[in-house]
Image: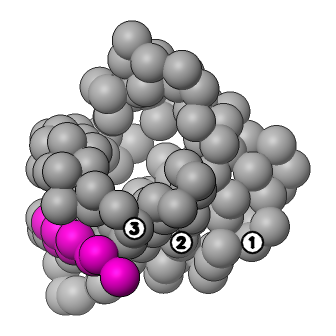
Amino acid sequence: MFMWTFEHSADTTAPAEAVWALYADVPGWVRWDSGLERAELHGSFAAGSEIVMTPQGQDEVRARITRADEDDTFADETLFGEVVLRFTHTLEPFAGGTRVTHRLEVTGPGAEEIGPAVAADLPDAVAALVKLAETA
């Protein structure tokens, strides 16, 4: 099985609750993820619900929330035939703030090519997310 992973973290003075509120506002993801034209949530922000996203200049993508532990971790999974993209978003509180970590794991044929393309703007998205959380 082919697998590729990438992880990026940033620290913020914002509490985990402020970051979580931005995660739970799926249509608002376009405010901090410049790679998205649109995002919508079908159901509640909980495991089993579907997120439909339209990346800039691409067809819509459907992801399923696989984990949603409030103010802690949420994960989602997107299937493209034999290729699986798994994102895990983790919030770790510390004295004076929160460490925000986004991890991408790609498995399947072509993972080594697909992963870097998907993760290219991940650091920018995390930076924009923590900045927005600090002003919330």
Q: Is residue 103 visible?
A: no
Residue range in magenta is: 1-8
Q: Which residue is labeled 2 in the image?
A: 74
**Percent x, y for residue 117?**
19, 42
Which residue occupies 48% across, 81% down? 72
Q: Nearer the viewer, mark 1 or mark 3?
A: 3
Secondary structure at numbered mark 2: strand
Residue wearing tag 1: 47
User: Percent position (x, y) of residue 79?
Assistant: 58, 56
Mark pair 3, 2: CA separation:
22 Å
Where residue 134 sits in the image (x, y, percent)?
26, 49
Query: Which of the numbered marks, if any, corresponds to residue 108?
Result: 3
Q: Is residue 3 magenta?
A: yes
- As helix, strand or loop, the secondary structure at mark 3 comes to loop
In the picture, the quarter occupied by the N terminus is bottom left
Q: Are marks 2 and 1 in contact (CB under 8 Å)?
A: no
Three-letter code for the amino acid on which mark 1 is drawn: Ala
Q: Nearer the viewer, residue 90 or 12?
A: 90
Quadrant of res 42: top right
The picture quadrant where one finds residue 115 is bottom left
Amino acid type of the residue that numbered disc 2 sits on in the rendered structure: Phe
The residue positioned 38% from the left and 71% from the top of the image is 107
Which image quadrant: the C terminus?
top left
Residue 10 inside the magenta-drawn segment: no
Majority SS type along the magenta span? strand
Name the one closer to the observer, 23 or 136: 23
Dot 3: within a 10 Å radius of its alpha carbon, few (fewer than 14), some, or many (20 or more) residues? Answer: some
Q: Position of residue 129 (x, y in %)?
A: 29, 46
Question: For this view, does 65 lie left or right of residue 86?
Answer: right
Image height of 114 relative to 90, above or below = above
